[in-house]
Image: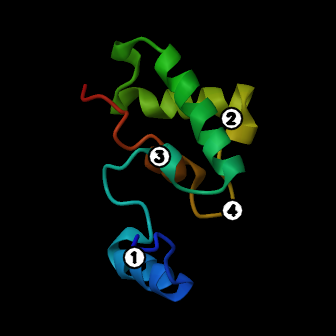
Amino acid sequence: MRKSTTRDPASVKRGYASRISDKNLGAPAGSPALLWGTMEDRHRKATLLYIWFKRPPEKRTANDLLKFYGELQQNNPQLVKHGHGDPYEQLKVDLYGYVLEP
């Protein structure tokens, strides 16, 4: 006799809930920026990263971030996230892990 492969929905929910903890409700440090947020926000981040990676590596350092922010404000202001604190600080968060050391 074969064992049933269907699972009780309550046990599935319990199993799913047991894998969620406070530490993984937000984006962990060092995780790719594209995995978190709404679809619109992920599209914004993907476009932001595309523009960032079009720059040569020597222009993708922390020293170049302010200039990049100015270029975004001028040419693509829709990519700068407003409403949650300082937009420049938000850009730094969006590009976390992708800014090279000078």
Check residue 20 in the rendering and tell me which mark sits there, or answer none: 1
**Residue for point 68% across, 50% down:** 39
The residue at 68%/55% (across/down) is 82
Q: Which residue lies under the disc numbered 3? A: 33
Q: Is residue 40 left or right of residue 14?
A: right
Q: Residues within 10 Å of mark 3 (few under 14, many from 20)?
A: many
Mark 2 belongs to which amino acid? Gln
Relative image position of residue 41 (x, y in whole percent) = 65, 49
Query: Closest to the observer: 47 or 63?
Result: 47
Tag in front: 1 or 3: 1
Q: What element carries label 1?
A: loop
Q: Residue 83 carries which label?
A: 4
Q: Which of 76 and 23 is in front in this view?
A: 23
Structural distance between the alpha carbons of marks 1 and 3: 19 Å
- Residue type for callout 4: Gly
Indicate the secondary structure of the residue bearing disc 3. Answer: helix
Residue 71 location (% of width, % of height) = 62, 26
Of residues 14 and 61, the one drawn nearer to the viewer in this rendering: 14
Q: In which quarter of the image is the C terminus?
A: top left
